[in-house]
Image (cartoon, rainbow, N blue to C red):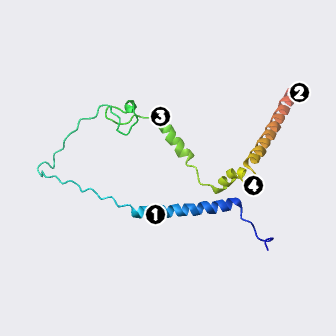
Amino acid sequence: MSLFSKKDDLLSQREKALNAEMARLEQEVQRLARETPKPVPIPRRERDDAAGAGKEFARPLPAAKAPANAAPGAAAHFNDSGVRKFDLMGVWKSLRHHVVGPTGNNPGMVRMLAAGSLHGLRPLRREKRVARNRFIFLFVTLLAILWGLVFSAFRNH
């Protein structure tokens, strides 16, 4: 009765294998999370001097120093108070990241991209070629229409 049974697609077989691997790795992560010891909280230090509880000690402001985790030579990006100066390029990158957003997990796109290496599926190269030919045809058609309009405008004068 193999005539009426549907064969599994290569992509679905690979997807099942990857899902099983992900489930195994998630179980491993959970097991490791249970085995690691919890961090012990550090107790707060109590002041021994009750008379000095209301006093504040002023610290001198740092002189144009970059924070310890900043890149070497980054002192020019900080002002005298140690506050980071306005960075136009950084604002542009964060705005662009906010507008574009992260790439999504799209299994349909993964299948399309992987189609070139699996037998039985149309490769993405063919789809690109069809789209390119369609664009060239429409572009040439548009040029012919524009040429006809310009030619008829000159002919009427």
Q: Is residue 105 above or below residue 65?
A: below
* Disc number placed over residue 155 in the picture, else none: 2
Residue ID for mark 1: 30
Classed neighbour count for the residue bearing mark 1: other residues with Cα under 10 Å, few (<14), some (14–19), many (≥20) = few
Instruction: Tell me the amino acid under the disc marked 4.
Output: His
Residue 62 rendering spot, x and y as whole percentages = 28, 34
Classed neighbour count for the residue bearing mark 3: other residues with Cα under 10 Å, few (<14), some (14–19), many (≥20) = few
* Disc number placed over residue 91 in the picture, else none: none
Q: Is residue 40 above or below residue 124?
A: below
Q: Front-most of 82 and 105?
A: 105
Q: Which quadrant holds the C terminus?
A: top right
Instruction: Tell me the amino acid under the disc marked 1.
Output: Gln
* Disc number placed over residue 119 in the picture, else none: 4
Sequence order check: which comes first, mark 1 or mark 3?
Answer: 1
Instruction: Tell me the amino acid under the disc marked 3.
Output: Leu
Real-space Cα distance between discs 1 and 2? 79 Å
Q: Is residue 96 above or below residue 113?
A: above
Real-space Cα distance between discs 1 and 4? 37 Å
* Disc number placed over residue 88 in the picture, else none: 3
Real-space Cα distance between discs 4 and 3? 49 Å
Q: Front-most of 113 and 62?
A: 113
Residue visible at 71% across and 62% down?
9
Residue visible at 67% across and 62% down?
13
Closer to us: mark 1 or mark 3?
1
